[in-house]
Image (spheres, rainbow, N blue to C red):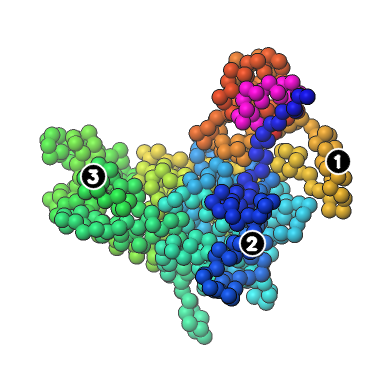
């Protein structure tokens, strides 16, 4: 008897992270599982209990719905993302993303592509005040995801504020935050950092929650940020908020300081530690700096900007002397070795000649090897240390001015945005020039605005991912009257205008000011759209599912090909910035090379596969192959299964 071959199913949902965690635990400690492969909870509790313990009492942080929220974080998403090229800017060349939809679903969908690839998560979530809103996570919803039920896909979702009198106000907020932070942590790289704005209402709860998720040992610190003036004479004046910093692995962030025979080197290490303690992510060490650093493996690095040492301390040569945005001063600066005038910045120098002469006399100008390199200004590390506290006092009202400058025709299109200068300074301290930055409570898009400004300033190529639910703006608001019916549409317009402004002000800077817009929506796969009827038996539901799948249209029909490929790429790790190249060697069927995220596969979604195509595919069995499950009869499936083995996947 011939055994019917089996093929692997390509992923059509985000990863089932709950099952992955159990599988990892089973590999490490199989004794914690019973004979049927189920987790023995009693054995797990006994393992965790201290020797001689007889009481289950311990310090714990509990609230209503905690376990449901945790389970929800790790259940796979059946949704997908579709491109919205009409609202995008430079869709074909940009590497930035703005995603419109519920952030929990989106974070799940980003797992396969961005797992441990994000350096910085920067979020400003709802503070849980009366005026704030919470995402309506409804774990009892069975027939439709709440984001779909509430109209997220079509017209946005009107979220409901919770008054202080609501008995579960804090629990609901913690449920919302826990599920999102749990899944977001997995996107952080090993030396990544998460930054969270908050105020007094949920500060203690957020601290305990983050201690559980990131580990108390990975708490970097908390900044008190003065952001307003409180004129209420009846209470203690509250004129500040908090900015909380956690590391994925604090041990990677903080170098071990060891004494050195060189005072200059010791100063460099000490500054690295102090800035590291003040939330500065330690950067990769300059391998060629000298042999001393090679011998001290525990010291993983200091700020890559601090490259040089002289008698005045540690300094950087990265500060530009050009005059941005308008014509500056014109004069010659002679190279000390070649005796020739150095190349001038396109828009001239930012200083008058008298200032430049003084900087030259103080040896604060850094020259290149010859006159062909534009000079740079030495800025000492001690000056940056003072900057650590300088931005903390940035007035919160500056954020409103930032937005007003982009929307001069309107009085106030967004309430209480964070200042661009604040976010830019923080990003400057915690990221390298090629890092990825994620903000899944994007609001008006300040994080993207700040990141583009920083890239223009230091020549960086950082990329952002913004996620914002299409929450309705208030009908009486300036934004609504201006035509921005959702927060996400306002965010898209703000980032678009900010990019145009940055390009105008920095004509010589190669800044990616474009972005791709994607929307959260239903899956293209009918398996993901079927919901079992709890009133029917298992056999009845199975028969109904088979009928549902049998009646489906071919996958690539009705102009949905691009959306289907996007869903396949997203859920199988090829990412959203994939390429699709038609393979001319195949004549009987349309076969593509799907490439993205440093991996590739052959892809064919035709509903039938010709014998000639099967024959042409066989020699390429070292490739991943993705086919429509409708295309394979038993004979062709057998041939391709024997050739491709685990490389054959169907959708």
- Disc 2: which residue: 41
Does label 2 or label 3 sit earlier along the sequence?
2
| 555 vs 614, nearest the viewer | 614
- The image shows residue 61 at horizontal and vertical percentages of 57, 71
**Dots 2, 3 in contact, CB < 8 A:** no
Does label 2 or label 1 sit earlier along the sequence?
2
**Separation of residues labelled 2 and 1 (CA atoms):** 35 Å
Q: Please tell me whether residue 478 belongs to the stretch shown in magenta.
A: no
Locate the C terminus and report the quarter of the image it occupies. top right
Which span is picked out in magenta?
A: 631-649
Q: Nearer the viewer, mark 1 or mark 3?
A: 1
Predominant SS along the magenta part:
helix
Classify mark 1: residues with Cα within 10 Å, few (<14), some (14-19) or many (20+): few
Q: Residue at x 67, y 18 (%)?
A: 614
- Disc 3: which residue: 289
**Dots 2, 1 in contact, CB < 8 A:** no
- The image shows residue 612 at horizontal and vertical percentages of 68, 14
Classify mark 3: residues with Cα within 10 Å, few (<14), some (14-19) or many (20+): few
Q: Nearer the viewer, mark 2 or mark 1?
A: 2
**Separation of residues labelled 1 and 3 (CA atoms):** 68 Å
Whether residue 615 appears in this view of the structure is yes
Does label 1 or label 3 sit earlier along the sequence?
3
* Residue 310 relative to residue 287: left or right: left
Whether residue 302 appears in this view of the structure is no
Q: Secondary structure at mark 1?
A: helix
Classify mark 2: residues with Cα within 10 Å, few (<14), some (14-19) or many (20+): few
Residue 617, placed above or below residue 425 = above
Give residue 511's quadrant in the image: top left
**Dots 1, 3 in contact, CB < 8 A:** no
- Disc 1: which residue: 543
């Amino acid at each position: 008897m011939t055994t019917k071959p089996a093929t692997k199913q390509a992923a059509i949902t985000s990863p089932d992270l709950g099952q992955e965690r159990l599988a990892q635990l089973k590999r490490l400690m199989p004794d914690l599982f019973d004979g049927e492969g189920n987790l023995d909870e009693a054995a797990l509790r006994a393992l965790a209990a201290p020797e001689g313990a007889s009481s289950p009492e311990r310090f714990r942080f509990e609230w209503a719905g905690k376990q449901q929220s945790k389970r929800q974080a790790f259940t796979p998403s059946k949704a997908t993302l579709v491109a919205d090229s009409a609202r995008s800017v430079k869709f074909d060349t940009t590497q930035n993303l703005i995603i419109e939809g519920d952030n929990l679903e989106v974070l799940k969908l980003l797992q396969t592509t961005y797992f441990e690839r994000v350096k910085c998560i920067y979020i400003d979530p709802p503070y849980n005040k009366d005026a704030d809103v919470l995402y309506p996570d409804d774990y009892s919803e069975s027939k439709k995801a709440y984001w779909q039920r509430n109209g997220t896909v079509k017209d946005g979702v009107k979220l409901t504020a919770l008054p202080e009198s609501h008995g579960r106000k804090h629990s609901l907020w913690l449920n919302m935050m826990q599920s999102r932070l749990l899944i977001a942590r997995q996107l952080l790289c090993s030396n990544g950092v998460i930054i969270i704005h908050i105020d007094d209402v949920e500060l203690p709860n957020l601290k305990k929650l983050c201690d559980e998720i990131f580990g108390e040992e990975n708490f970097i610190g908390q900044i008190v940020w003065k952001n307003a003036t409180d004129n209420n004479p009846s209470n203690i004046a509250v004129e500040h908020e908090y900015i909380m910093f956690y590391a994925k692995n604090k041990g990677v962030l903080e170098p071990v300081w060891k004494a050195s025979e060189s005072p200059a080197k010791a100063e460099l290490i000490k500054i690295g530690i102090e800035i590291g303690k003040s939330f500065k992510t330690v950067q990769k060490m300059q391998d060629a700096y000298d042999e001393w650093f090679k011998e001290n493996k525990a010291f993983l690095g200091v700020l890559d900007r601090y490259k040089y040492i002289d008698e005045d301390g540690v300094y950087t040569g990265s500060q530009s002397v050009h005059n941005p945005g308008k014509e500056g001063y014109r004069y010659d600066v002679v190279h000390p070795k070649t005796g020739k005038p150095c190349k001038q910045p396109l828009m001239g120098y930012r200083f008058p000649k008298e200032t430049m002469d003084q900087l030259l006399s103080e040896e604060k100008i850094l020259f290149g090897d010859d006159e062909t390199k534009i000079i740079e200004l030495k800025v000492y590390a001690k000056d940056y240390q003072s900057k650590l506290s300088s931005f903390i006092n940035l007035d919160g009202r500056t954020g409103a001015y930032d937005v007003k400058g982009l929307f001069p025709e309107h009085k106030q299109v967004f309430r209480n945005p964070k200042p661009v200068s604040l976010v830019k300074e923080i990003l400057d301290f915690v990221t390298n020039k090629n890092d990825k930055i994620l903000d899944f409570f994007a609001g008006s898009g300040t994080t993207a605005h700040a990141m583009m400004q920083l890239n223009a300033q230091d020549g960086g190529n950082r990329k952002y991912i913004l996620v914002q639910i299409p929450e309705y703006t208030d009908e009486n608001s300036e934004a609504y009257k201006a035509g921005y019916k959702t927060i996400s549409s306002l965010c898209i317009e703000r980032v678009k205008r900010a990019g145009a402004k940055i390009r105008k002000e920095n004509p010589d800077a190669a800044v990616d000011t474009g972005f791709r817009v994607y929307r959260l929506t239903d899956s293209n796969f009918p398996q993901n759209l079927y919901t079992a009827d709890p009133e029917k038996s298992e056999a009845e539901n199975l028969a109904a599912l088979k009928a549902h799948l049998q009646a489906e249209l071919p996958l690539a029909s009705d102009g949905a090909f691009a959306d289907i490929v996007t869903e396949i790429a997203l859920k199988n790790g090829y990412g959203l910035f994939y390429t699709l190249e038609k393979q001319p060697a195949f004549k009987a069927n349309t076969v593509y090379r799907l490439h993205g995220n440093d991996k590739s596969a052959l892809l064919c979604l035709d509903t039938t596969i010709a014998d000639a195509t099967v024959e042409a595919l066989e020699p390429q069995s070292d490739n991943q192959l993705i086919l429509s499950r409708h295309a394979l009869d038993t004979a062709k499936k057998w041939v391709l299964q024997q050739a491709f083995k685990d490389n054959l996947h169907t959708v």
